[in-house]
Amino acid sequence: MDRHRAYFPIAVDSQDRKDRIAMSRNASARGVLLGSPSRFDIGERLVMTFRIMPAGPMYAGVAGKVVRVDEAANAEDPMWRHVMAIEFERPLDEEVIEALRTAAEHTVYLDFDN
């Protein structure tokens, strides 16, 4: 299963918490790795809404469960300090996968060390 490095904002709702935010780090048809200021528990069900490309379609009601929770290696970035792997309840449609491929191809990575 191809995983695509793509960064896009995600609106996240759980049963107890609504209107939380996250930022994707990478995604595949089966799941997404995201960072968030909110920490969700392993096994918690999330419902996500996102737009991969700025002018692209909105994907709403994408459900999944948290399968892994880590703390970000960079403690100086509290905005995205909780890193979580989310497994989708249903694989994403090919249309969404194509948007992920396009986003990954057009992402610019800055190297501040050189």
Image (cartoon, grey):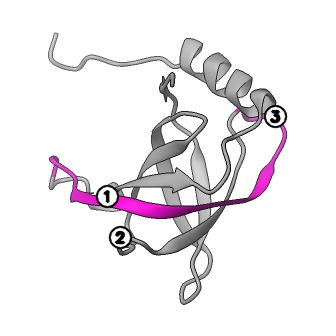
Q: Is residue 71 left or right of residue 57?
A: left
Instruction: Find numbered disc 3 in the image and state the secondary structure of the residue it sits on.
Output: loop
Q: Which residue is mark 1?
A: 68
Q: Which residue is mark 3?
A: 56
Q: Residue at left 61%, top 35%? A: 29
Give yes or no for contact between labels 3 and 2 (Cβ–Cβ under 8 Å): no
Counting residues from the start of the chain, the first of labels 2 and 1 encountered is 2
Counting residues from the start of the chain, the first of labels 3 and 1 encountered is 3
Amino acid type assigned to the residue bearing label 1 in the image: Arg
Instruction: Find numbered disc 1 in the image and state the secondary structure of the residue it sits on.
Output: strand
Amino acid type assigned to the residue bearing label 3 in the image: Gly
Q: Residue at left 16%, top 9%? A: 114
Give yes or no for contact between labels 2 and 1 (Cβ–Cβ under 8 Å): yes
Which of discs 3 and 2 lies nearer the camera? The answer is 2
Instruction: Find numbered disc 2 in the image and state the secondary structure of the residue it sits on.
Output: loop
Q: Residue at left 68%, top 28%? A: 97
**How far is the residue under mark 3 from the one under mark 1?**
29 Å
Which of discs 3 and 1 lies nearer the camera? The answer is 1
**How far is the residue under mark 3 from the one under mark 2?**
31 Å
Q: Which residue is mark 2?
A: 42
The crowding category of the residue bearing disc 2, from other C-alpha atoms within 10 Å (few below 14, some 14 to 19, many at least 20), is: some
Counting residues from the start of the chain, the first of labels 3 and 2 encountered is 2
Span colored in magenta = 53-74
The crowding category of the residue bearing disc 3, from other C-alpha atoms within 10 Å (few below 14, some 14 to 19, many at least 20), is: few
The crowding category of the residue bearing disc 1, from other C-alpha atoms within 10 Å (few below 14, some 14 to 19, many at least 20), is: some
Q: Residue at left 15%, top 55%? A: 75
Amino acid type assigned to the residue bearing label 2 in the image: Ile
Q: Is residue 111 left or right of residue 85?
A: left
Could you say where residue 72 lies in the image, as x and y percent from the top left? 22, 52
The number of numbered badges drawn on the structure is: 3
